[in-house]
Amino acid sequence: MLPGLLPELVALLRRRGVPLGVDDVAALRCALAAGFGWQSRTALRELCVSLWAKSPAEAEVVRAVFASVDLDDWDVTHVPSSTDVPSDPQAPPGSPSPSVPSTVPADIGAGAGPSPTTRPQPPPAANAGPLPHSGWDDPKLVLVPQYPVTPRAAAQVWRRMRQPARRGPAVELDVEETVRRQTRTGVATPPVLVPARRNLARLLLLVDTEGSMQPYQDFVGQVELSIRRAARLDTLAVRYFHDVPGHADRALLANADHLHADLDRILADIPALTYARVYQEPDLIRSEGLSDVLEAVGRSTPVCVVSDAGAARGRLDTLRLLDTVAMLKALRGSGRAVAWLNPVEPGRWERTTAELVARHVPMHPMTVPGMYAVVDVLRGRFAPVARPL
Amino acid sequence: MSGNNLRAAASGLARAVSDLRAAQRTLPPEAIDLACHVSLPVAVDPRLLHLTRINFLPDLPYEMEARLLLSPLFHELGDGLYEIKPELRDLLLAALDARFGSERLQRMAVLLERYTDLRSSWPDSPELAHAQRLTALHVLRPDEALQWLADNEAAASTDTGLAPTWFVAMRRQINTTPPDRALLERLLDGAVRQLRQPDRRRRVADVLTVAALLALLGASVAYAIEALRAAISDGDPAVRRAARDALPRAEAEVRHDQPPSDEVLALRASPDGLADPAESRVVLIGGDGLPGPYRLPEVKAALLDLVDVLTDREVWGVDRRHCQVLLGADRSQAEEALRRAADEVGPDGLLLVHFAGHGLVDPDGTIVFGIAGTDPEQPRLAGLPYPVVEGYVAASGAGLKLLLFDCVLAGSVSWPRLSPRIDYLLTQGPGLPPVGTGSPALTRELTRLLWSGVPGQGALLDLRAIHAALNPNLPLLLQLRHDSSTTPLVRNRAWPESTLVGRVLVVAPDGVDPDVVGPGRSGAVVLVLRHHPREGTLGVRLDDPSDRAVDLPADWSRLVAPPPVEFRGGTPATRPGFVAVAQFRADERPSPGFRALRARIGVLLRFAEPARRPPRIRLFRGYLGWEPGHLESLLAEGIVWRADPEQATRRLLTDQPEKLWDDLTRDVEFTPQLRGGGPSRSDFDLLLAGLAWRIRQGHRLTLLLGDGVSSASQVRARRAAAAEISERSPGERSYPDPHGDRQDWAVGRLLARCGAWFDHRVFTTRSAGALARAIRAEGRAATVSQVGTERAAVGSGDTVRVFQVQDDAGGSRYGSADYGRRSGWSPPPADRLSRLITGDHVYVVGHHGEPGSVMAALRRLQEDRGVSVSWVAAPAGESEAELSIRTTALRHLLGRGATPYPGVTADTFLTALCRQFGALPSAAPRLGSGVRFPRGEEEFVVDPG
């Protein structure tokens, strides 16, 4: 019989983005049956952390959620024993419990809110000097970001950017070829070596930053970090820009259809952006020409643009659309794959520049399914759009 | 405080309230709650806002963080920092105290302190870091904070490296206690007092201030609401309008600590995406006042019919008071009506101006609508010019602006281009009969279409869909702004869920409350009288006769269909009387007081003089009610399904009502006979009902699922396979269905409901599109990939990726398809497939006849990459590969290290697992469990006495 708190704990953790499944619950059940986790609430909490958390961040989430579950109906630690030591009412709720089962769960009372005694009390404030700590703590607080896409999920998605090939020095033994050669010749031949497999996939990431993208910067940064760490690409170049990397000739708009915000009438006349600058850091300090970057990464390297395309502020800006179309034409160049990740939810693209940009380039939201779709496009999958460039 | 300071404070407060109102208009209340939390820090960065949300308001969507930071509440400081203006900050902090109590403020302070410590959050700005820490300390230990400030300021400490101006600023900030609820109440009190001042503009501002403060306070304050009610009768229209807008929100302001769900948020934002009927205005102008040959006598009836359909709650539901029909009106009356409508329409409303009559052309080319007093020779003098109408509409504050002109223009003059400030213009084009012979054809056609709906479209109709469905013989011109092309206008009465009115529903036995039905009875049969997505559903039971004889006047009692007894329609009504269901023969005309529900089925709303050829009637005492969405969920779960319409109509007033349920379900046995040309809706429902039923009952079940569109030979092959399986495994049933898509939908929803593990990827041999849509409809996330033996119809959607394998004489070939297009066929499939499938788990909804290449791919996934492959609802396999995969799948599903139960089938396991998670809707509220329909009883219950 599982403790009554388990369903609540699992539900809370799933709500916090810890992907628990049947196996995890079964694992806890097995561990409990084997006698682990019964000593104290802390022991049970650490058992859950050991079984369920796959990273320090998840461990913190598990601990925080554990602190917030109601343990009133959990009576496992209530084992009468002659060695019972009454718990010290002044003991900090977060401190490790003694190994002897206590008659009162150690953390009871912690659920009521922040406590002034749970963190080491700092030395008394001097008359002058550094600002003292309050000494308050709240074990229920989580200080790990929980963005819509976890680093683990992002890594899984971007690992699909693969183009494996054998390149480089021959260092791996080709068993089959070695055996075949020996059996054919009948004499001992030297082992056949082949180059190791490498991922040759490359990617240029163009990230819109500052302004309306500022609220999304952490989230985008986390995804970018996941790509850097986990995608194991042959080449990953990340450049930054603000809104658009350059401006197209405004005179083109003279022939546009003034009754409609789109540029369908002059779409063919918009030339590729020739003068555009992108930056090496999110702070937009050191710039370089977009054409130089494109040349450096190679003609076939796919490009992923990360930008809200005006959706965050709900604006429909024909000038921005013009510049964006010119940029997309420059990016596409000689048939390079281009996809767009938009951190704003699709429902808010309506009546904004983003909706019109999405008619020209595959644009997907920054969710797991959206990133799967973008990776597909970057791998060369044909993705129809309303008005291709 | 000096006069200047007082004025500055008042001005600051006014700006704060103005910003607050702007934010309240665009953000849900829970986002304002989040703003209240982050009003404590001196400045906020996106990560601190994010941590605040996930700790205190975790149900608020992530998207709301960006919307909040970009709202008028925040001011961008640069370097990723945002600030709330001091006056507004005080209001929000007071609201935090009022709604969440002082403990929440303390927790927020702890979060702020830990955040400042943990992350070296502001390494380049020690002033900011110290300010944040000191703010938190001031909340948690105010004495220490003040002491530290005093000590360090006096010593002009060099340890901290803080400038003297910093100390001055911080002292000003923390020298007072944090604002609390009393501040809001004081401000509210002041604003209420100001409502009586003579300045009109100030009164409007004060009404808005009262509303904003009430919303912020999060409680219903009686005297403030009374003041708003009093303002509704103010002499100034602007004050009246402001009070009218503010009052419902203030009255409904019942706040809970627990934030509402996403669904509730979505419902608050826009119940179904239509323009808000309460904020909308409709002006219908009839051009019936023209002389001689220009007179159009049919206009009046056509416009009144249009009002009927627009006010119907199943179509749109605009209030009749907001529909102005101008018949015989002159120009000044028409302009007055237009001006009033443009003035009253709200930002969430639709302004619709419709003209039916003759369009005349002035000598200078201006289009003029012919209304009363118009001289056809000189229309400009008394007619209503098009630019005037356009001007009123364009200048209004409506969220959606629509012009409909049912008139033909004389000569070759064409309609002008649509103004960019108007969303739609639908007019008659050239080619209609000339003056004197026309009729309001567009009005008639539009009315007919709105009543009938557009089959094949979704739940809502936009003007593009309406235009496409209008009579093709009508030469119509549609102009629309690009970005408004898909804005829905009305509900689609032909959409399946919205046409339950008049439908007969069959309820499974376990969906009926035994208190209502009585023990030992089978299911129930119900006729739906009213169905509204936001108000609920009302119906009567058709199969539950009482032993009480009907007591009616002789004229009517002879019309009662046998048996001549009262029927128990459901829970007794609150007013005396019956629901009188009536049915006509095909060649009869309805009698007076008859309200049609569907075809020849309806209700009698009054017992007037019986018609010459009267209907057959049956009297029901009481009725059943479902809350909004309840019946739809029962339908989706398979507890309730639609009876075959023809059969139901034939047996509606059967003389053997006890057998009605059996009659309507005789052919069911959950093995529906599928007719040629595709399964009907009822077949689909029956199938879903069967699956859900049997899984709940724990039956052994084999799902033999189709591969999308099938040829006749494939259907035969599947039936043969089904028969073979039944023969081989007695007791198991199989359900061949040649029509995969609908079945996929059913299965997808079922699996999504059952599977807590379904937030993963689904790998299916079936129609991926339907399955993915169904899973998404249940709020689950899944990426569905398809491996099929045929080219299949492909659904769209972001998460749908389709891979196809075709086995033919030439060998296995692999390809991919998207949005119905096919490209890039190339061999070989197995290794490519195994590369394409990523993730840790693959669930296969599969059956018979997967190509060998698919099996090889799955095996490779298992062996090479350790991917677990789970097989759901598979029949006994023949090959070693199938056996291996299924065994592994079961082991995986049952948990590592657990012993597989001998003889367990996938679906039994599924059921057990669902029970463990409580995912099956076994606790769903049952039919007739006392739910009352909130409105509408008075429409149906009549008292013949």
Image (spheres, helix red, strand yellow):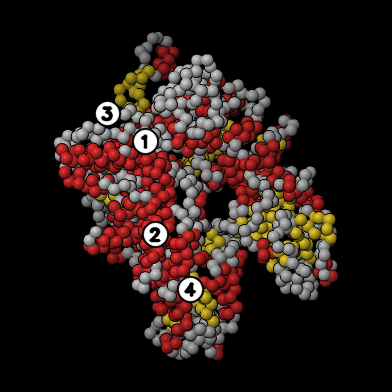
State the image coordinates of residue A306 (x, y, percent, origin top left): 34, 45
| Residue depicted at 44% across the width and 42% down the height | B58
- For the residues labelled 2 and 3, the Cα–Cα distance comes to 45 Å
Within 10 Å of disc 3 (Cα), the crowding (few <14, some 14-19, many 20+) is: few
Label 2 with label 1: CB-CB less than 8 Å: no
Q: Which residue is mark 3?
A: A123
Disc 2: which chain?
A: B
Q: Secondary structure at mark 1?
A: loop
Counting the numbered discs, the total is 4
Please, what is the three-letter code of the amino acid marked with disc 2?
A: Leu
What number is the disc on residue B174? none
The image quadrant of residue B491 is bottom right
| Residue depicted at 26% across the width and 30% down the height | A124
Please, what is the three-letter code of the amino acid marked with disc 1?
A: Leu
Disc 4: which chain?
A: B
Q: Which residue is mark 2?
A: B188
Disc 1: which chain?
A: A
Please, what is the three-letter code of the amino acid marked with disc 3?
A: Pro
- For the residues labelled 3 and 1, the Cα–Cα distance comes to 25 Å
- For the residues labelled 2 and 1, the Cα–Cα distance comes to 37 Å
- For the residues labelled 4 and 3, the Cα–Cα distance comes to 75 Å
Label 2 with label 3: CB-CB less than 8 Å: no
Q: Which residue is mark 4?
A: B353
Q: Secondary structure at mark 4?
A: strand
| Residue depicted at 46% across the width and 54% down the height | B219
| Residue depicted at 58% across the width and 75% down the height | B304
- Give the label, 4 or 3, closer to the camera: 3
- Give the label, 4 or 2, closer to the camera: 2
Q: Which residue is mark 1?
A: A143
